[in-house]
């Protein structure tokens, strides 16, 4: 699994210093210096954690944290020179996992990131090195990984709860959308088709999902 750490900091020297420290660990740092560049990069790269400065050119860290939480549970550590309690509470209420005040020791930042990752790690091994990473909406097989949509991930997670069991389309529908919208069988079939293709691509042609005529789908180990 990737150990990509995104450092969002407009002070280039400080960002480079943090990147140097992360480079000495098992993590791979990437720096972004402008708030407007963050969301597209996060959606494309699925980092393991984000160090997010509050004061940025373009979108600020508070708005970015709120926006990221609309599509990802990636651990976010807010970084700021503001120490007022109201700022601390606001950052955490928006979905931040930790809060780091400047000035700080780079070693402390690395340690805090490691602690948050240990606390929030939600990687599930299904079988034969098939792993689901709910924080990043990623599935991997023997180090090969691909990103899933939220719906695809929930479908796969449901199937993986009881491998070999046949789940009807109605049972799978219950897990698809948090707002319990009405969907039809063709919607389920479309998502399963896309999910199956992604799994085949990362596992040398192995077809993990079996369609059972008139009954539904099951995960085949």
Image: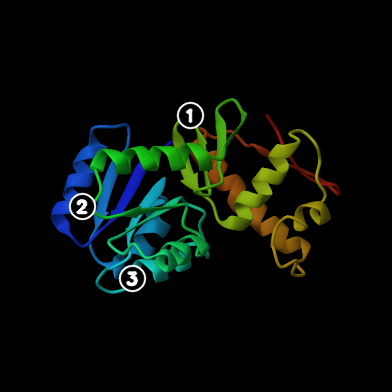
Q: Is residue 139 visible from the viewing direction of this image?
A: no
Q: Secondary structure at mark 1?
A: loop
Q: Position of residue 1 (x, y in %)?
A: 43, 36
111 on left or right of 214? left
C-alpha distance separating marks 1 and 2: 32 Å
Residue sitting nearer the eye, 205 or 52: 52
Quadrant of residue 60 in the image? Answer: bottom left
Judged from the image, the secondary structure of the residue bearing numbered disc 2 is helix
Q: Is residue 11 above or below residue 49?
A: below
Give how far apart the Cα atoms at labels 3 and 1 are.
38 Å
Q: Residue at x 47, y 63 (%)?
A: 89
**In the rendered image of this protein, does residue 105 appear above or below residue 193?**
above
- According to the picture, the residue beneath numbered tag 2 turns out to be 15
Give me the residue at 77% from left, 33% from top: 164
> Which numbered disc flags the more N-terminal residue, 2 or 3?
2
Q: Which residue reaches farthest left?
A: 13
Residue 60 badge: 3
Mark 3 vs mark 1: in front? 3
Residues tagged 2 and 3 counted as in contact (Cβ below 8 A): no
How packed is label 1: few (under 14 Cα within 10 Å), some, or many (20 or more)?
Answer: few
- Which residue is disc 1 drawn over? 142
**Label 2 – label 3 distance at C-alpha:** 16 Å
Left or right: residue 24 compared with residue 179: left
Residue at 27% across, 61% down: 81
N-terminal of the two: label 3 or label 1?
A: 3
* Element class at badge 3: loop
């Amino acid at each position: 699994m990737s150990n990509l750490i995104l450092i969002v900091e407009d002070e280039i020297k400080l960002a480079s210093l943090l990147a140097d420290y992360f480079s000495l660990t098992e993590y791979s740092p990437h720096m972004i210096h402008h708030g407007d560049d963050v969301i597209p990069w996060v959606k494309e790269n699925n980092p393991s954690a984000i160090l997010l400065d509050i004061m940025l050119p373009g979108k600020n860290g508070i708005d970015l944290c709120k926006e990221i939480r609309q599509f990802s549970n990636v651990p976010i550590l807010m970084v700021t020179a503001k120490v007022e309690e109201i700022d601390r509470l606001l950052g955490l209420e928006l979905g931040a996992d930790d809060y780091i005040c400047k000035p700080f020791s780079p070693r402390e930042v690395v340690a805090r990131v490691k602690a948050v990752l240990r606390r929030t790690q939600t990687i599930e091994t299904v079988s034969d090195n098939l792993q689901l990473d709910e924080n990043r909406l990623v599935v991997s097989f023997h180090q090969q990984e691909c990103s899933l949509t939220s719906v695809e991930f929930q479908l796969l997670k449901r199937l993986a709860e009881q491998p070999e069991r046949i789940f009807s389309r109605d049972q799978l529908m219950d897990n698809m959308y948090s707002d319990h919208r009405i969907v039809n069988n063709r919607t389920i079939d479309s998502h399963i088709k896309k999910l199956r293709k992604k799994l085949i691509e990362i596992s040398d042609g192995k077809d993990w999902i079996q369609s059972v005529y008139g009954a539904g789908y099951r995960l085949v180990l």
